Image: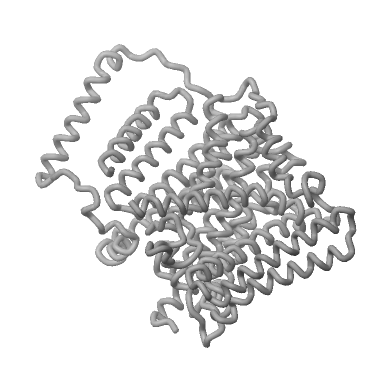
Amino acid sequence: MTFFIVTLIKIVIVFAVFMTTLAYLQWIERKVLAHIQSRTGPLRVGPHGLMQPLADVFKLLTKEDVFPPFVNRFFYLLAPFIAVCLALITISIVPFGPEIEVAGVRTYMQIGDVHVGILLVLAITAVSVYGVALAGWSSNNKYSLLGGLRSSAQMISYELPLSLAIVSPLLLANQLSFRAISDSQAGYYLGFIPRWNIFQAPFPQIFAFIIFLIAAFAETNRIPFDLPEAENELVAGFHTEYSSMKFACFFMAEYANIVNITCVATLLFLGAWHPLFPAPYSNWVAPLVFLLAALSCFAQAAQPRRKNDQYTFPLFGVVFLVLTAIFVVAALEIVPVLSTILLSIFWFLAKVGLLIFAFIWVRGTLPRFRYDQLMHFAWTFLFPVSLLNLLITGLLVALFPERI
Amino acid sequence: MDTVLFIIFAIVAIVAGFNVVLQRHPISSALSLVGVMGSLAVLYLLLGAEFMAMAQMIVYGGAVMVLFIFVIMLLNAGAEKPSSKAWFAQIAGLPLLLAFIATLGFLIYSALPGLRAVEFGSWTMGTAEEIGKLLFTQYLLPFEVISVLILIAILGAVVLALKEID
Protein backbone atom coordinates (compact mmCIF):
# COMPACT_ATOMS: atom_id res chain seq x y z
CA MET A 1 0.00 0.00 0.00
CA THR A 2 2.78 2.41 0.93
CA PHE A 3 4.35 1.55 -2.42
CA PHE A 4 1.26 2.77 -4.26
CA ILE A 5 1.01 5.97 -2.25
CA VAL A 6 4.71 6.76 -2.60
CA THR A 7 4.65 6.04 -6.33
CA LEU A 8 1.53 8.17 -6.76
CA ILE A 9 3.20 11.08 -4.96
CA LYS A 10 6.30 10.70 -7.14
CA ILE A 11 4.20 10.58 -10.31
CA VAL A 12 2.30 13.73 -9.33
CA ILE A 13 5.52 15.63 -8.55
CA VAL A 14 7.33 14.51 -11.73
CA PHE A 15 4.28 15.16 -13.91
CA ALA A 16 3.70 18.64 -12.53
CA VAL A 17 7.34 19.64 -12.84
CA PHE A 18 7.67 18.08 -16.31
CA MET A 19 4.59 19.83 -17.71
CA THR A 20 5.66 23.19 -16.30
CA THR A 21 9.12 22.69 -17.73
CA LEU A 22 7.65 21.93 -21.16
CA ALA A 23 5.64 25.16 -21.09
CA TYR A 24 8.56 27.27 -19.89
CA LEU A 25 11.07 25.65 -22.21
CA GLN A 26 9.28 27.51 -24.98
CA TRP A 27 9.81 30.80 -23.09
CA ILE A 28 13.46 29.96 -22.42
CA GLU A 29 14.06 29.03 -26.05
CA ARG A 30 12.50 32.26 -27.32
CA LYS A 31 14.46 34.35 -24.81
CA VAL A 32 17.81 32.70 -25.53
CA LEU A 33 17.29 32.84 -29.30
CA ALA A 34 16.29 36.49 -28.99
CA HIS A 35 19.41 37.38 -27.06
CA ILE A 36 21.59 35.47 -29.53
CA GLN A 37 20.04 37.62 -32.27
CA SER A 38 20.21 40.88 -30.24
CA ARG A 39 16.48 41.08 -29.61
CA THR A 40 14.58 41.10 -26.33
CA GLY A 41 12.20 38.22 -26.94
CA PRO A 42 8.78 37.90 -25.25
CA LEU A 43 8.29 40.89 -22.96
CA ARG A 44 4.66 41.96 -22.99
CA VAL A 45 2.81 39.29 -21.04
CA GLY A 46 3.81 39.54 -17.41
CA PRO A 47 7.23 40.70 -16.19
CA HIS A 48 9.87 39.74 -18.78
CA GLY A 49 7.23 37.78 -20.65
CA LEU A 50 7.05 35.20 -17.87
CA MET A 51 3.31 34.73 -18.39
CA GLN A 52 3.84 34.06 -22.11
CA PRO A 53 3.61 30.23 -21.85
CA LEU A 54 0.25 30.60 -20.07
CA ALA A 55 -0.98 32.97 -22.74
CA ASP A 56 0.21 30.56 -25.45
CA VAL A 57 -1.62 27.68 -23.85
CA PHE A 58 -4.85 29.70 -23.67
CA LYS A 59 -4.40 30.85 -27.25
CA LEU A 60 -3.94 27.29 -28.49
CA LEU A 61 -6.84 25.98 -26.44
CA THR A 62 -9.31 28.62 -27.57
CA LYS A 63 -8.31 28.65 -31.24
CA GLU A 64 -10.65 27.27 -33.84
CA ASP A 65 -10.00 23.58 -34.42
CA VAL A 66 -9.78 23.48 -38.20
CA PHE A 67 -10.56 20.08 -39.65
CA PRO A 68 -9.42 19.90 -43.30
CA PRO A 69 -12.00 18.19 -45.55
CA PHE A 70 -9.92 15.55 -47.37
CA VAL A 71 -7.91 14.09 -44.52
CA ASN A 72 -8.00 10.51 -43.35
CA ARG A 73 -9.98 11.25 -40.19
CA PHE A 74 -8.82 8.37 -38.01
CA PHE A 75 -5.08 8.68 -38.61
CA TYR A 76 -5.27 12.47 -38.67
CA LEU A 77 -6.53 12.39 -35.09
CA LEU A 78 -4.34 9.46 -34.04
CA ALA A 79 -1.02 11.04 -35.08
CA PRO A 80 -0.75 13.87 -32.49
CA PHE A 81 -2.02 11.45 -29.85
CA ILE A 82 0.77 8.95 -30.65
CA ALA A 83 3.38 11.71 -30.72
CA VAL A 84 2.53 13.20 -27.35
CA CYS A 85 1.85 9.92 -25.52
CA LEU A 86 5.16 8.37 -26.53
CA ALA A 87 7.04 11.55 -25.68
CA LEU A 88 5.69 11.53 -22.12
CA ILE A 89 6.69 7.93 -21.27
CA THR A 90 10.47 8.21 -20.99
CA ILE A 91 10.52 10.57 -18.01
CA SER A 92 8.94 7.86 -15.84
CA ILE A 93 12.10 5.74 -15.82
CA VAL A 94 14.60 8.57 -15.34
CA PRO A 95 16.30 8.51 -11.93
CA PHE A 96 16.87 11.96 -10.42
CA GLY A 97 18.84 10.88 -7.39
CA PRO A 98 19.93 8.05 -5.09
CA GLU A 99 17.84 6.07 -2.63
CA ILE A 100 16.40 8.25 0.14
CA GLU A 101 14.53 7.61 3.37
CA VAL A 102 11.66 9.95 4.23
CA ALA A 103 9.58 9.27 7.36
CA GLY A 104 10.75 5.66 7.51
CA VAL A 105 9.94 4.91 3.87
CA ARG A 106 12.92 4.00 1.73
CA THR A 107 12.45 4.90 -1.91
CA TYR A 108 14.38 5.82 -5.02
CA MET A 109 14.11 9.25 -6.60
CA GLN A 110 12.65 7.66 -9.72
CA ILE A 111 9.11 6.61 -10.62
CA GLY A 112 10.05 3.11 -11.70
CA ASP A 113 13.22 1.29 -12.66
CA VAL A 114 13.07 -1.00 -15.68
CA HIS A 115 15.71 -3.72 -16.10
CA VAL A 116 15.98 -2.96 -19.79
CA GLY A 117 15.52 0.79 -19.32
CA ILE A 118 17.76 2.00 -22.11
CA LEU A 119 16.21 -0.49 -24.55
CA LEU A 120 12.79 0.83 -23.58
CA VAL A 121 13.95 4.33 -24.50
CA LEU A 122 15.22 3.04 -27.85
CA ALA A 123 11.93 1.23 -28.46
CA ILE A 124 9.95 4.39 -27.74
CA THR A 125 12.18 6.40 -30.08
CA ALA A 126 11.73 3.77 -32.77
CA VAL A 127 7.94 3.78 -32.47
CA SER A 128 7.56 7.55 -32.15
CA VAL A 129 8.37 7.88 -35.86
CA TYR A 130 4.75 6.85 -36.52
CA GLY A 131 3.39 10.06 -35.04
CA VAL A 132 5.25 12.21 -37.53
CA ALA A 133 4.94 9.84 -40.50
CA LEU A 134 1.18 9.38 -40.03
CA ALA A 135 0.61 13.09 -39.54
CA GLY A 136 2.35 13.74 -42.83
CA TRP A 137 0.49 11.03 -44.70
CA SER A 138 -3.03 11.51 -43.33
CA SER A 139 -3.06 15.27 -43.90
CA ASN A 140 -3.43 14.63 -47.65
CA ASN A 141 -1.09 17.49 -48.47
CA LYS A 142 2.10 17.36 -50.55
CA TYR A 143 4.14 19.37 -48.09
CA SER A 144 2.98 17.35 -45.13
CA LEU A 145 3.70 14.08 -46.94
CA LEU A 146 7.20 15.24 -47.87
CA GLY A 147 7.79 16.30 -44.27
CA GLY A 148 6.62 12.94 -42.98
CA LEU A 149 8.75 11.03 -45.48
CA ARG A 150 11.82 13.10 -44.69
CA SER A 151 11.27 12.68 -41.01
CA SER A 152 10.92 8.90 -41.11
CA ALA A 153 13.97 8.49 -43.37
CA GLN A 154 16.01 10.78 -41.15
CA MET A 155 14.95 9.14 -37.91
CA ILE A 156 15.71 5.65 -39.21
CA SER A 157 19.14 6.73 -40.45
CA TYR A 158 20.16 8.55 -37.29
CA GLU A 159 18.85 5.82 -35.02
CA LEU A 160 21.87 3.69 -36.04
CA PRO A 161 24.63 6.04 -34.81
CA LEU A 162 22.44 6.86 -31.81
CA SER A 163 22.15 3.21 -30.80
CA LEU A 164 25.83 2.53 -31.45
CA ALA A 165 26.80 5.56 -29.36
CA ILE A 166 24.62 4.22 -26.55
CA VAL A 167 26.22 0.78 -26.68
CA SER A 168 29.74 1.94 -25.71
CA PRO A 169 28.85 3.38 -22.27
CA LEU A 170 26.74 0.26 -21.75
CA LEU A 171 29.90 -1.81 -22.24
CA LEU A 172 31.49 0.16 -19.41
CA ALA A 173 28.47 -0.03 -17.12
CA ASN A 174 27.59 -3.68 -17.91
CA GLN A 175 23.95 -2.93 -17.12
CA LEU A 176 20.85 -1.81 -18.97
CA SER A 177 18.85 -0.20 -16.16
CA PHE A 178 19.25 3.54 -15.70
CA ARG A 179 19.72 3.21 -11.96
CA ALA A 180 22.61 0.77 -12.34
CA ILE A 181 24.20 2.88 -15.08
CA SER A 182 24.03 5.95 -12.84
CA ASP A 183 25.43 4.06 -9.86
CA SER A 184 28.34 2.78 -11.96
CA GLN A 185 29.45 6.37 -12.51
CA ALA A 186 29.79 7.26 -8.82
CA GLY A 187 33.20 7.99 -7.29
CA TYR A 188 36.38 9.72 -8.44
CA TYR A 189 39.75 8.80 -9.93
CA LEU A 190 42.67 10.11 -7.84
CA GLY A 191 40.11 11.80 -5.63
CA PHE A 192 39.06 14.50 -8.09
CA ILE A 193 38.37 13.24 -11.65
CA PRO A 194 34.72 12.11 -11.72
CA ARG A 195 34.01 8.60 -13.01
CA TRP A 196 31.40 9.89 -15.44
CA ASN A 197 31.32 7.88 -18.62
CA ILE A 198 32.90 10.71 -20.62
CA PHE A 199 35.95 10.42 -18.32
CA GLN A 200 35.64 6.71 -17.56
CA ALA A 201 38.67 4.42 -17.94
CA PRO A 202 39.72 2.47 -20.00
CA PHE A 203 38.30 4.54 -22.86
CA PRO A 204 36.64 7.91 -22.17
CA GLN A 205 33.33 8.08 -23.99
CA ILE A 206 33.71 11.68 -25.13
CA PHE A 207 33.41 10.69 -28.82
CA ALA A 208 30.34 8.59 -28.14
CA PHE A 209 28.88 11.59 -26.30
CA ILE A 210 29.42 13.89 -29.28
CA ILE A 211 27.98 11.32 -31.71
CA PHE A 212 25.01 10.86 -29.39
CA LEU A 213 24.37 14.60 -29.25
CA ILE A 214 24.53 14.97 -33.05
CA ALA A 215 22.17 12.05 -33.54
CA ALA A 216 19.94 13.48 -30.81
CA PHE A 217 19.58 16.72 -32.77
CA ALA A 218 18.42 14.67 -35.75
CA GLU A 219 16.07 12.48 -33.70
CA THR A 220 14.34 15.49 -32.19
CA ASN A 221 14.14 17.24 -35.60
CA ARG A 222 16.08 20.22 -34.27
CA ILE A 223 17.75 22.82 -36.35
CA PRO A 224 20.69 21.60 -38.32
CA PHE A 225 18.45 18.61 -39.10
CA ASP A 226 14.99 20.16 -39.06
CA LEU A 227 14.20 19.24 -42.67
CA PRO A 228 10.84 17.63 -41.79
CA GLU A 229 9.50 21.08 -40.92
CA ALA A 230 11.78 23.32 -42.98
CA GLU A 231 9.50 26.33 -43.27
CA ASN A 232 10.99 27.83 -46.43
CA GLU A 233 10.64 24.53 -48.28
CA LEU A 234 7.64 22.76 -46.78
CA VAL A 235 5.47 25.47 -45.10
CA ALA A 236 5.56 23.70 -41.74
CA GLY A 237 6.21 20.12 -42.81
CA PHE A 238 4.22 17.35 -41.21
CA HIS A 239 2.09 19.60 -39.01
CA THR A 240 1.01 22.05 -41.72
CA GLU A 241 -2.63 20.96 -41.54
CA TYR A 242 -2.86 20.87 -37.76
CA SER A 243 -4.31 23.62 -35.64
CA SER A 244 -5.34 24.36 -32.09
CA MET A 245 -4.81 21.59 -29.53
CA LYS A 246 -3.65 19.05 -32.12
CA PHE A 247 -0.82 21.39 -33.09
CA ALA A 248 -0.08 21.96 -29.41
CA CYS A 249 0.32 18.18 -29.02
CA PHE A 250 3.09 18.11 -31.63
CA PHE A 251 4.66 21.13 -30.04
CA MET A 252 4.59 19.56 -26.59
CA ALA A 253 5.96 16.29 -27.99
CA GLU A 254 8.87 18.13 -29.58
CA TYR A 255 9.89 19.79 -26.33
CA ALA A 256 9.26 16.64 -24.31
CA ASN A 257 11.58 14.78 -26.69
CA ILE A 258 14.29 17.36 -26.12
CA VAL A 259 13.99 16.97 -22.35
CA ASN A 260 13.99 13.17 -22.70
CA ILE A 261 17.04 12.95 -24.88
CA THR A 262 19.02 15.37 -22.70
CA CYS A 263 18.02 13.35 -19.63
CA VAL A 264 19.25 10.17 -21.32
CA ALA A 265 22.51 11.90 -22.33
CA THR A 266 23.02 13.02 -18.74
CA LEU A 267 22.35 9.53 -17.41
CA LEU A 268 24.55 7.75 -19.92
CA PHE A 269 27.50 10.10 -20.24
CA LEU A 270 27.48 12.89 -17.65
CA GLY A 271 27.22 10.78 -14.52
CA ALA A 272 23.53 11.43 -13.72
CA TRP A 273 23.33 13.25 -10.38
CA HIS A 274 26.97 12.72 -9.36
CA PRO A 275 28.75 16.07 -8.90
CA LEU A 276 31.77 17.22 -10.88
CA PHE A 277 34.08 17.08 -7.86
CA PRO A 278 33.95 15.37 -4.44
CA ALA A 279 31.29 16.02 -1.83
CA PRO A 280 32.18 18.66 0.78
CA TYR A 281 33.32 21.10 -1.93
CA SER A 282 30.73 20.31 -4.58
CA ASN A 283 27.97 21.11 -2.06
CA TRP A 284 28.86 24.78 -2.33
CA VAL A 285 28.44 25.04 -6.11
CA ALA A 286 24.67 25.42 -5.87
CA PRO A 287 24.70 28.28 -3.30
CA LEU A 288 27.45 29.99 -5.26
CA VAL A 289 25.52 29.82 -8.53
CA PHE A 290 22.35 31.18 -6.94
CA LEU A 291 24.29 33.90 -5.08
CA LEU A 292 25.88 35.03 -8.35
CA ALA A 293 22.45 35.06 -9.99
CA ALA A 294 21.09 37.19 -7.11
CA LEU A 295 24.03 39.60 -7.31
CA SER A 296 23.67 40.02 -11.07
CA CYS A 297 19.93 40.70 -10.58
CA PHE A 298 20.72 43.44 -8.07
CA ALA A 299 23.38 44.84 -10.39
CA GLN A 300 20.79 44.97 -13.20
CA ALA A 301 18.31 46.66 -10.89
CA ALA A 302 20.85 49.38 -10.12
CA GLN A 303 20.84 50.47 -13.78
CA PRO A 304 17.33 49.69 -15.05
CA ARG A 305 17.03 49.63 -18.87
CA ARG A 306 13.23 49.66 -18.72
CA LYS A 307 10.86 51.20 -16.24
CA ASN A 308 9.69 47.92 -14.74
CA ASP A 309 13.20 46.60 -14.22
CA GLN A 310 13.67 48.50 -10.96
CA TYR A 311 10.80 46.50 -9.42
CA THR A 312 11.19 43.12 -11.12
CA PHE A 313 14.94 42.59 -10.82
CA PRO A 314 15.13 43.14 -7.02
CA LEU A 315 12.26 40.66 -6.70
CA PHE A 316 14.14 38.04 -8.73
CA GLY A 317 17.24 38.85 -6.65
CA VAL A 318 15.34 38.12 -3.44
CA VAL A 319 14.03 34.85 -4.89
CA PHE A 320 17.58 33.82 -5.77
CA LEU A 321 18.75 34.82 -2.27
CA VAL A 322 16.10 32.58 -0.74
CA LEU A 323 17.30 29.74 -3.01
CA THR A 324 20.87 30.48 -1.91
CA ALA A 325 19.81 30.24 1.74
CA ILE A 326 18.02 26.93 1.11
CA PHE A 327 21.07 25.47 -0.62
CA VAL A 328 23.42 26.75 2.10
CA VAL A 329 21.32 24.78 4.56
CA ALA A 330 21.53 21.80 2.18
CA ALA A 331 25.29 22.20 1.78
CA LEU A 332 25.85 22.21 5.55
CA GLU A 333 24.01 18.84 5.64
CA ILE A 334 21.91 19.81 8.68
CA VAL A 335 19.09 17.55 7.47
CA PRO A 336 20.85 14.77 5.52
CA VAL A 337 17.78 13.64 3.53
CA LEU A 338 16.99 17.16 2.39
CA SER A 339 20.54 17.81 1.23
CA THR A 340 20.64 14.51 -0.69
CA ILE A 341 17.39 15.37 -2.47
CA LEU A 342 18.24 19.00 -3.19
CA LEU A 343 21.85 18.50 -4.20
CA SER A 344 21.29 15.51 -6.48
CA ILE A 345 18.36 17.27 -8.14
CA PHE A 346 20.47 20.40 -8.52
CA TRP A 347 23.31 18.52 -10.21
CA PHE A 348 20.98 16.53 -12.43
CA LEU A 349 18.99 19.54 -13.54
CA ALA A 350 22.15 21.61 -14.02
CA LYS A 351 23.51 19.07 -16.50
CA VAL A 352 20.17 18.68 -18.29
CA GLY A 353 19.77 22.44 -18.37
CA LEU A 354 23.23 22.94 -19.87
CA LEU A 355 22.49 20.40 -22.60
CA ILE A 356 19.13 22.02 -23.37
CA PHE A 357 20.91 25.37 -23.55
CA ALA A 358 23.34 23.81 -26.03
CA PHE A 359 20.33 22.65 -28.10
CA ILE A 360 18.97 26.21 -28.22
CA TRP A 361 22.42 27.64 -28.84
CA VAL A 362 22.89 25.38 -31.86
CA ARG A 363 19.48 26.43 -33.14
CA GLY A 364 20.56 30.04 -32.91
CA THR A 365 23.87 29.52 -34.69
CA LEU A 366 23.86 26.77 -37.29
CA PRO A 367 22.21 26.81 -40.71
CA ARG A 368 20.12 23.92 -41.98
CA PHE A 369 21.63 20.97 -43.86
CA ARG A 370 20.61 20.10 -47.37
CA TYR A 371 18.82 16.76 -47.58
CA ASP A 372 21.61 14.88 -49.41
CA GLN A 373 24.18 16.33 -47.00
CA LEU A 374 22.08 15.06 -44.11
CA MET A 375 21.99 11.49 -45.41
CA HIS A 376 25.60 11.59 -46.54
CA PHE A 377 26.72 12.78 -43.11
CA ALA A 378 24.79 10.04 -41.32
CA TRP A 379 25.89 7.10 -43.44
CA THR A 380 29.42 7.95 -44.50
CA PHE A 381 30.70 9.78 -41.43
CA LEU A 382 28.65 9.34 -38.28
CA PHE A 383 27.94 5.63 -38.69
CA PRO A 384 31.57 4.50 -39.34
CA VAL A 385 32.89 6.75 -36.57
CA SER A 386 30.44 5.36 -34.04
CA LEU A 387 31.30 1.82 -35.17
CA LEU A 388 35.00 2.54 -34.71
CA ASN A 389 34.35 4.03 -31.28
CA LEU A 390 32.43 0.90 -30.31
CA LEU A 391 35.23 -1.38 -31.54
CA ILE A 392 37.90 0.50 -29.59
CA THR A 393 35.78 0.56 -26.46
CA GLY A 394 35.03 -3.14 -26.77
CA LEU A 395 38.69 -3.99 -27.29
CA LEU A 396 39.86 -1.94 -24.31
CA VAL A 397 37.12 -3.29 -22.05
CA ALA A 398 38.17 -6.81 -23.06
CA LEU A 399 41.86 -6.05 -22.48
CA PHE A 400 41.35 -4.41 -19.08
CA PRO A 401 38.48 -6.30 -17.47
CA GLU A 402 39.63 -5.27 -13.99
CA ARG A 403 39.06 -1.55 -14.17
CA ILE A 404 40.67 0.97 -11.84
CA MET B 1 -3.02 -8.95 -12.71
CA ASP B 2 -0.77 -10.87 -15.13
CA THR B 3 -3.69 -12.95 -16.36
CA VAL B 4 -5.85 -9.86 -16.91
CA LEU B 5 -3.06 -8.21 -18.89
CA PHE B 6 -2.54 -11.41 -20.85
CA ILE B 7 -6.22 -11.62 -21.81
CA ILE B 8 -6.35 -7.95 -22.81
CA PHE B 9 -3.27 -8.07 -24.99
CA ALA B 10 -4.04 -11.48 -26.45
CA ILE B 11 -7.41 -10.09 -27.60
CA VAL B 12 -5.71 -6.98 -28.97
CA ALA B 13 -3.21 -9.16 -30.86
CA ILE B 14 -5.96 -11.32 -32.39
CA VAL B 15 -8.21 -8.39 -33.31
CA ALA B 16 -5.29 -6.47 -34.82
CA GLY B 17 -4.24 -9.62 -36.67
CA PHE B 18 -7.70 -9.95 -38.24
CA ASN B 19 -7.61 -6.24 -38.98
CA VAL B 20 -4.43 -6.68 -41.05
CA VAL B 21 -6.39 -8.90 -43.42
CA LEU B 22 -9.73 -7.09 -43.29
CA GLN B 23 -8.56 -3.49 -43.83
CA ARG B 24 -8.72 -2.23 -47.41
CA HIS B 25 -6.05 0.42 -47.15
CA PRO B 26 -2.38 -0.70 -47.01
CA ILE B 27 -1.51 1.87 -44.31
CA SER B 28 -4.32 0.62 -42.06
CA SER B 29 -3.12 -2.95 -42.55
CA ALA B 30 0.48 -2.02 -41.80
CA LEU B 31 -0.52 -0.15 -38.64
CA SER B 32 -2.62 -3.09 -37.49
CA LEU B 33 0.50 -5.19 -37.93
CA VAL B 34 2.31 -2.73 -35.65
CA GLY B 35 -0.48 -3.34 -33.15
CA VAL B 36 0.13 -7.11 -33.40
CA MET B 37 3.87 -6.58 -32.85
CA GLY B 38 3.24 -4.32 -29.86
CA SER B 39 0.84 -6.68 -28.13
CA LEU B 40 3.20 -9.61 -28.81
CA ALA B 41 5.93 -7.58 -27.11
CA VAL B 42 3.68 -7.19 -24.06
CA LEU B 43 3.05 -10.95 -24.06
CA TYR B 44 6.82 -11.59 -24.14
CA LEU B 45 7.19 -9.19 -21.25
CA LEU B 46 4.53 -11.04 -19.27
CA LEU B 47 6.39 -14.31 -19.86
CA GLY B 48 9.59 -12.78 -18.49
CA ALA B 49 11.43 -12.32 -21.79
CA GLU B 50 12.12 -8.63 -21.25
CA PHE B 51 14.99 -8.41 -23.72
CA MET B 52 12.96 -10.15 -26.43
CA ALA B 53 10.06 -7.77 -25.81
CA MET B 54 12.21 -4.69 -26.29
CA ALA B 55 14.01 -6.17 -29.31
CA GLN B 56 10.59 -6.94 -30.80
CA MET B 57 9.55 -3.31 -30.38
CA ILE B 58 12.83 -1.86 -31.66
CA VAL B 59 13.31 -4.15 -34.65
CA TYR B 60 9.80 -5.16 -35.75
CA GLY B 61 7.63 -2.44 -34.25
CA GLY B 62 10.15 0.26 -35.10
CA ALA B 63 12.57 -0.32 -37.95
CA VAL B 64 10.84 -2.95 -40.10
CA MET B 65 7.30 -1.55 -39.93
CA VAL B 66 8.48 2.04 -40.37
CA LEU B 67 10.16 0.92 -43.60
CA PHE B 68 6.90 -0.78 -44.68
CA ILE B 69 4.94 2.39 -44.05
CA PHE B 70 7.66 4.49 -45.64
CA VAL B 71 7.41 2.45 -48.84
CA ILE B 72 3.60 2.53 -48.82
CA MET B 73 3.68 6.31 -48.39
CA LEU B 74 6.31 6.71 -51.10
CA LEU B 75 4.39 4.59 -53.63
CA ASN B 76 1.19 6.37 -52.60
CA ALA B 77 -0.75 3.10 -52.70
CA GLY B 78 -4.51 3.66 -52.59
CA ALA B 79 -7.27 1.57 -51.06
CA GLU B 80 -7.82 -1.82 -52.63
CA LYS B 81 -10.94 -2.50 -54.67
CA PRO B 82 -12.76 -5.55 -53.33
CA SER B 83 -12.37 -8.22 -55.98
CA SER B 84 -15.17 -10.61 -56.83
CA LYS B 85 -14.34 -13.67 -54.81
CA ALA B 86 -14.18 -17.11 -56.30
CA TRP B 87 -17.11 -19.33 -55.28
CA PHE B 88 -14.71 -21.86 -53.77
CA ALA B 89 -13.13 -19.28 -51.45
CA GLN B 90 -16.56 -17.99 -50.40
CA ILE B 91 -17.86 -21.41 -49.43
CA ALA B 92 -14.80 -23.27 -48.19
CA GLY B 93 -12.54 -20.42 -47.00
CA LEU B 94 -13.54 -20.23 -43.34
CA PRO B 95 -13.86 -24.01 -42.74
CA LEU B 96 -10.48 -24.64 -44.38
CA LEU B 97 -8.88 -21.94 -42.24
CA LEU B 98 -10.33 -23.44 -39.07
CA ALA B 99 -9.19 -26.92 -40.14
CA PHE B 100 -5.69 -25.56 -40.77
CA ILE B 101 -5.48 -23.92 -37.33
CA ALA B 102 -6.81 -27.07 -35.66
CA THR B 103 -4.24 -29.26 -37.49
CA LEU B 104 -1.45 -26.88 -36.52
CA GLY B 105 -2.54 -26.93 -32.86
CA PHE B 106 -2.80 -30.73 -32.90
CA LEU B 107 0.67 -31.08 -34.46
CA ILE B 108 2.26 -28.80 -31.88
CA TYR B 109 0.58 -30.64 -29.00
CA SER B 110 1.61 -34.05 -30.30
CA ALA B 111 5.19 -32.93 -31.05
CA LEU B 112 5.67 -31.48 -27.56
CA PRO B 113 3.84 -33.82 -25.17
CA GLY B 114 5.16 -32.20 -21.96
CA LEU B 115 3.31 -28.90 -22.47
CA ARG B 116 1.82 -27.39 -19.34
CA ALA B 117 0.01 -24.16 -18.61
CA VAL B 118 2.33 -21.17 -18.24
CA GLU B 119 2.86 -19.63 -14.82
CA PHE B 120 3.57 -15.96 -15.19
CA GLY B 121 6.76 -14.87 -13.46
CA SER B 122 8.18 -18.37 -12.99
CA TRP B 123 10.74 -18.05 -15.77
CA THR B 124 13.59 -15.59 -15.22
CA MET B 125 16.08 -16.49 -17.95
CA GLY B 126 14.92 -13.76 -20.33
CA THR B 127 17.33 -11.04 -19.21
CA ALA B 128 19.80 -9.50 -21.65
CA GLU B 129 22.64 -11.13 -19.69
CA GLU B 130 21.31 -14.68 -20.05
CA ILE B 131 20.45 -14.25 -23.72
CA GLY B 132 23.90 -12.81 -24.40
CA LYS B 133 25.60 -15.74 -22.67
CA LEU B 134 23.56 -18.29 -24.62
CA LEU B 135 24.09 -16.50 -27.94
CA PHE B 136 27.84 -16.41 -27.54
CA THR B 137 28.34 -19.91 -26.15
CA GLN B 138 25.71 -22.51 -26.97
CA TYR B 139 24.25 -20.86 -30.07
CA LEU B 140 27.40 -19.22 -31.40
CA LEU B 141 27.42 -21.07 -34.74
CA PRO B 142 23.79 -20.34 -35.70
CA PHE B 143 24.30 -16.75 -34.58
CA GLU B 144 27.32 -16.27 -36.84
CA VAL B 145 25.68 -18.11 -39.74
CA ILE B 146 22.65 -15.83 -39.52
CA SER B 147 24.85 -12.74 -39.52
CA VAL B 148 26.64 -13.98 -42.65
CA LEU B 149 23.25 -14.68 -44.24
CA ILE B 150 22.08 -11.13 -43.48
CA LEU B 151 25.33 -9.76 -44.90
CA ILE B 152 24.71 -11.69 -48.12
CA ALA B 153 21.17 -10.31 -48.24
CA ILE B 154 22.49 -6.76 -47.87
CA LEU B 155 25.05 -7.32 -50.63
CA GLY B 156 22.31 -8.73 -52.85
CA ALA B 157 20.19 -5.64 -52.24
CA VAL B 158 23.12 -3.40 -53.13
CA VAL B 159 23.79 -5.33 -56.35
CA LEU B 160 20.13 -5.13 -57.37
CA ALA B 161 20.02 -1.41 -56.60
CA LEU B 162 23.17 -0.78 -58.66
CA LYS B 163 21.63 -2.60 -61.62
CA GLU B 164 18.67 -0.20 -61.47
CA ILE B 165 20.96 2.84 -61.53
CA ASP B 166 22.89 1.59 -64.58
| Relative image position of residue A195 (x, y in whole percent) | 51, 77
In the picture provided, is A141 more to the left or to the right than B83? right
Residue B19 x/y as whole percent: 39, 27
As rendered, which of A24 and B33 lies closer to the eye?
A24
Query: x, y percentage for residue A252?
Result: 61, 44
Task: Name above or below for residue A226 compared with residue A355.
Answer: above
> Residue at horizontal 55%, vertical 41%?
A83
x and y, in percent, of residue B115 in the image: 13, 45
Q: Is residue B19 left or right of residue A354?
A: left
For the C terminus of chain B, give its image quadrant: top right
Tell which of A16 and A347 is nearer to you: A16
Say above or below: A138 vs A229: above
Q: Residue at x 52, y 44 (%)?
A: A128
Q: Viewer-proximal residue, A28 or A54? A: A54
Report how many numbered discs are placed on residues in the image.
Answer: 0
Instruction: Identify which residue is drawn at 36% across, 40% down.
Output: B39
Residue B158 at least partly seen:
no
Quarter of the figure with the N terminus of chain B: top left
As drawn, B28 above or below A319 = above
Q: Is residue A44 left or right of residue A283?
A: right
Q: Residue furthest bottom?
A: A190
What colour-coding does the image apply? one colour
**Left or right: A271, with A21 as reference point:** left
| Residue A152 image-quadrant placement | top right
Can residue A323 be seen at all in this image of the molecule?
yes
Q: Residue at x 29, y 63 (%)?
A: B130
Q: Is residue A19 above or below residue A137?
A: below
Question: Would you identify the image quadrant in which residue A378 lies?
Answer: bottom right
